[in-house]
Amino acid sequence: MTLTLYNTLTRRQEPFTTVEPGKVKMYYCGVTVYDYCHLGHARACIVWDVVRRYLQFIGYEVRYIQNFTDIDDKILNRARQEHSSMEAVADRFIKAYFEDMARLGIKEADEYPRATHTMDGIQRLIHELESKGFAYPSQGDVYYAVRQFSEYGKLSGRKLEDLQVGGSDRVNVDDPEYQKKKDPFDFALWKAAKPGEPAWESPWGQGRPGWHIECSAMVRDRLGETIDIHTGGEDLVFPHHENEIAQSEAVTGKPLSRYWLHNGMVKVDGEKMSKSLGNFTTIRDLLDRDVDPMAVRLFVLMAQYRKPIDFTDEAIASATNGWHTLKEGLLFGYQYGEKLGWGLGTENNPIPSTQYPVPNPFVERFQEVVNDDFNFPGGLTVLFKLAKELSREGNIFVHQGKTETPPDELQRQWQTLVTLAGVLGLETQLEIESTTSEGPSDAEIEVKIQQRQQARQARNFAESDRIRNELLAQGITLIDSRDGTRWHRN
């Protein structure tokens, strides 16, 4: 079962091999921190979080880096509007980012470099580009000479001649920035300081970096010259990732990344999400509407990661129903494990720390489908099959006091479900524990059942019914059978 990935660079699916055996260097182009994260960010962060989890699951040691763009025109505009500073705006929305991601169950990256903390690396890279003839200064700015890089366009498939024809009517020759360039396609590596803007000292005068050079420098500083996986939304393919390749590879002469992976965009009711259309939804707004974060994860993972997804009320309702099904299976062990005589760990951790599902058909099938370009929807079918079977056995146990499947096999299936769900970041709280604390304890229930049995033997059926109804009001259902009285929490 070889993992194969669709590589945007080669436009085909390829077997996955790494620069260093057993290790993965992975970089995700993170957010520009000028506002709260929206559904598009949620999708990207969930997808790459699960990709990282899966790589670790199949045995790779993953170093995962995600950057913050903390200097940008949008951040500066926000700071002006709020009579604040760029640093204050960036810090506030970085804090909000971590709050939102925690609610979605996103594992933190190994490191979060910030553009403003990478100035030495940025300036060093610009200097090397200049010395190799790929960059030139102009009136305090520094530009990348696009035509000097013969492979420009290899990621996006765009050709300069086609771009020139399509963009000729949009060029403003009176634009001061245009007049600084030797060629309309050249882009800024360094921007001269403007009045009232933050600036850093450099060999070209005070200024700040362009957007594209920031990621090239952060990748190189944190992961080296060639990494294994570079990810981001498909809207970053051109020009951002195209320019990253041009910058980095012109200096090193090596591939910046072996694989380029891009997630599809999020639409809302069939339309592109935008503030102007009034369909812009932040992560916190969505979750504050009592939408379960796990339903959001499931909504994202039910679609192939490279395809667009449409966010609708119906889609979230469907994902919520799906999560209820998985959740019922995930709670099976907490509800019935002790009664089935499983050899469990502690009350709050029914899976012993050393326990891991041995190879079995469910794990093998899960890996088989997910290895096909991170086919998480296919992996979910394995989880749903396990969850539905466990739910069925739970219902049988409640009504008949025994299961059709041997308890040790059910334990194996449940531990498999919990493990595979964890790979997808789908986890549930021990709600049964809170239910227990609010209602009578198991021992108190057994006392009540004994009192009811004594009332029935004395033919005091009114007292017997009163005890049954009292327990029912506390969320406890009694089931009488020839083998005695069983109970379960509603």
Image (cartoon, grey):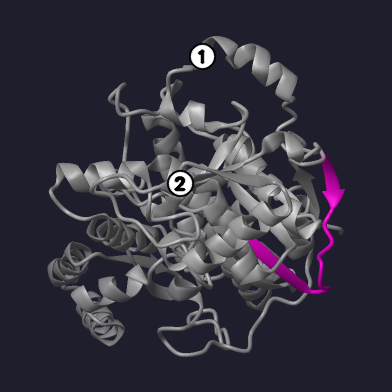
Q: Position of residue 481 (x, y in %)?
A: 43, 67
Give the residue pinned by disc 1.
Answer: 170
Q: Position of residue 336 (x, y in %)?
A: 48, 74
Which quadrant of the view contains residue 26?
bottom right
Residue 476 against residue 215 in the figure, above or below: below
Which mark sits nearer the N-terminus, 2 or 1?
Answer: 2
- As drawn, the residue found furthest toward the front would be 139
Q: Amino acid at mark 1?
A: Arg
Q: Amino acid at mark 2?
A: Gly
Of circles 2 and 1, the one toward us is: 2
Q: Position of residue 24 (x, y in %)?
A: 72, 68
Q: Is residue 20 magenta?
A: yes
Residue 94 against residue 321 in the figure, above or below: below
Q: Nearer the viewer, residue 55 or 73?
A: 73
Q: Nearer the viewer, residue 283 or 486?
A: 283
Identify the mark at residue 367; answer none if there is no mark: none
| Region in magenta | 12-26
Left or right: where 365 falls relative to 411: right
CA gap, disc 2 to disc 1? 25 Å
Circle 2 packing at 10 Å, graded few (<14), some (14-19), many (20+), is some
Left or right: where 315 falls relative to 313: right
Q: Is residue 109 magenta?
A: no
Identify the mark at residue 140; answer none if there is no mark: 2
At 74% from the left and 53% from the top, the residue drawn is 132
